[in-house]
Amino acid sequence: YRSFRSLLVIAAPVAAGVALAFGLTDLAIGHLNSNTAFLGSIIVGNGINFAIILLARYSESRRAGDDLRTALRLALRQTWLGTATAALAASVAYGSLIVTDFRGFSQFGWIGGIGMIFCWVATFTLAPALLVTLASGLGVFGVFLFILFYLGRKVMQPLVQIKERLQGVVEQV
């Protein structure tokens, strides 16, 4: 794609998906061990595909002369089902490890399975917003601010609230 803008559109959803997966891991498991610490790279390696496919279809439509809204609508309509199926298949494949007795593999199943779903959801919510923001003329700095806002308000804040509620419940028990 040879542009910093494309890198942002591809990397930001994956970063959000990984952040969500590890945030949920912190809530559910509490830590990573040496067997699960490498999962970030696996989630990124597999989760990046959704954004690449979406951006490729969007770029193809723009090169064909479609305006922003039409290109985005076509890209979303023509990629959501295939990428959702792939995300679900990868999630189930990773999730199959949950039933193992080895704690590292079991945690790998939870984190990898959830990570794929989070990367897909982040791609189909964040990438379109980034494409519109970039096209609006705000530029890379505007996108950077948008990402900080998105990660702060839409991703991390709810996770912190959930963790605080769970800690309150645990303290009462």
Image: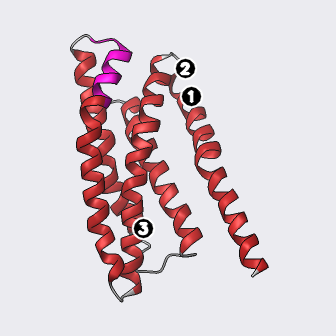
Where, by quadrant of the figure, is residue 116 drawn?
A: bottom left
31 part of magenta stretch: no
* Span shown in magenta: 66-76
Residue 162, percent from left and from top: 66, 60
Q: Nearer the viewer, mark 2 or mark 3?
A: 3
Q: Considering only vertical position in the picture, is 150 above or below 112?
A: above
Q: Give the residue displayed 36% in from the left and 89% down from the top.
A: 101
Q: Main secondary structure of the magenta part?
A: helix
User: Could you tell me the amino acid type at mark 2?
Assistant: Leu
Q: Residues within 10 Å of mark 3 (few under 14, many from 20)?
A: many
Can see residue 104? yes
Q: Which mark is residue 8?
A: none
Label whose residue precedes the other's in the sequence (2 or 3): 3
Tell me how far mark 1 sits from mark 3, CA to CA.
32 Å
In the depicted structure, whether residue 55 falls above or below residue 64: below
Q: In the picture shown, does residue 98 fall above or below 78?
A: below
| C-alpha distance separating marks 2 and 1 | 7 Å
The correct choice, above or below, for 168 with respect to 139 in the image is below
Q: The disc labelled 1 sits on which kind of residue?
A: Phe
Q: Which residue is mark 2?
A: 138
Q: For mark 1, what is the residue?
A: 141
The reply to whether callout 2 and callout 1 are in contact (CB within 8 Å) is yes
Q: Residue at x 36, y 59 (%)?
A: 43
Q: Amino acid at mark 3?
A: Ile
Residue extending farthest to the right is 172
Q: Which residue carries the number 3 mark?
A: 111
Give the number of the mark in front: 1 or 3. Answer: 3
Residue 80 image point, x, y percent: 30, 38
Q: Quadrant of residue 166?
A: bottom right
Q: Position of residue 107 (x, y in %)?
A: 42, 76
